[in-house]
Image: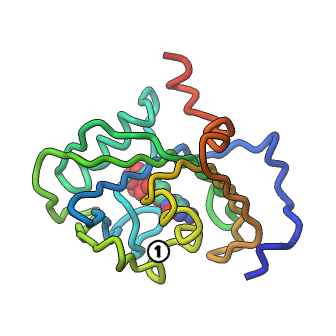
Amino acid sequence: MSAQQGCSIDWKNWQAEIPATLMFIVRDGQVLLIEKLTGIGQGKVNGPGGKIDPGESAEQAVIRECQEELHITPSNPVKMGELHFAMSDIPDIHCHVYMAEEFEGEPTPTREANPLWTKLSEIPFEKMWADDRFWLPQMLDGQKFNGRFEFDLEEIIWQDVQFGEDACALWLGCPLELAK
Ligand SMILES: Nc1[nH]c(=O)nc2c1ncn2[C@H]1C[C@H](O)[C@@H](COP(=O)(O)OP(=O)(O)OP(=O)(O)O)O1
């Protein structure tokens, strides 16, 4: 990985085509991951989530995606981070990342996802997007973050991840949330 090279993205004026979400539910030393069966990242392990629909806030979207993908409804989601993905082969993505400790329902396999309760010490990074190892462990440790990644296909060619309260100041937010 050549993540130390210069970055070709003008992040100041960067705008993603796709606003999206991710949810990580943690309970009893385990995190609820999915094997993603459809959409962007099909075949990878990730948290449940997906695109934000027009008129939705990021929080509404992440709850809806958990309902659609796993038939569960997370309670009291906490926003933990924003991810900015400049991609080479698919549209750029701006992703809002949440954690929760409680949910209603029973995680159920669907057309879109298989639920995978995973020990926090056994997260299968080799089956996940390449960026996850640079923010997911810290987030599961309670740190908020802001991450920017430039990808060439599946490879990270530039990255910057910041943690802590300073990172929250870098969040772009969700325009629809700001408009509410
Ligand atoms: N580099 C990356 N690292 C990561 O951890 N998650 C990523 C990622 N790039 C994309 N994602 C996630 C964010 C979001 O949850 C998902 C993209 O949304 P999807 O295509 O799954 O949307 P939908 O479930 O709305 O699908 P469709 O209904 O098929 O459009 O992929």
The answer to whether 161 appears left or right of 78 in the picture is right
| Neighbour tally class for label 1: few under 14, some 14-19, many 20 plus, Cα within 10 Å | some
Judged from this view, the residue extending furthest toward the left is 106
User: Can you say whether 56 is above or below 142 in the image?
Assistant: above
Q: Residue at x 39, y 72 (%)?
A: 45
Q: Residue at x 36, y 65 (%)?
A: 38
Q: Give the total of numbered labels.
A: 1
Q: Residue 140, percent across and down? A: 42, 59
Q: Quadrant of residue 86?
A: bottom right
Q: Residue 122, percent across and down? A: 35, 79
Kind of residue at badge 1: Met
Which SS class for mark 1? loop
Quarter containing the N terminus? bottom right
- Between 169 and 149, the residue placed more toward the observer is 169
User: Can you say whether 77 is above or below 84 in the image?
Assistant: above
Q: Which residue is mark 1?
A: 128
Q: Residue 153, percent across and down? A: 66, 74
Q: Quadrant of residue 25?
A: bottom left
Q: Residue at x 78, y 79 (%)?
A: 2
Q: Residue 9, percent across and down? A: 82, 55
- Between 37 and 144, the residue placed more toward the observer is 144
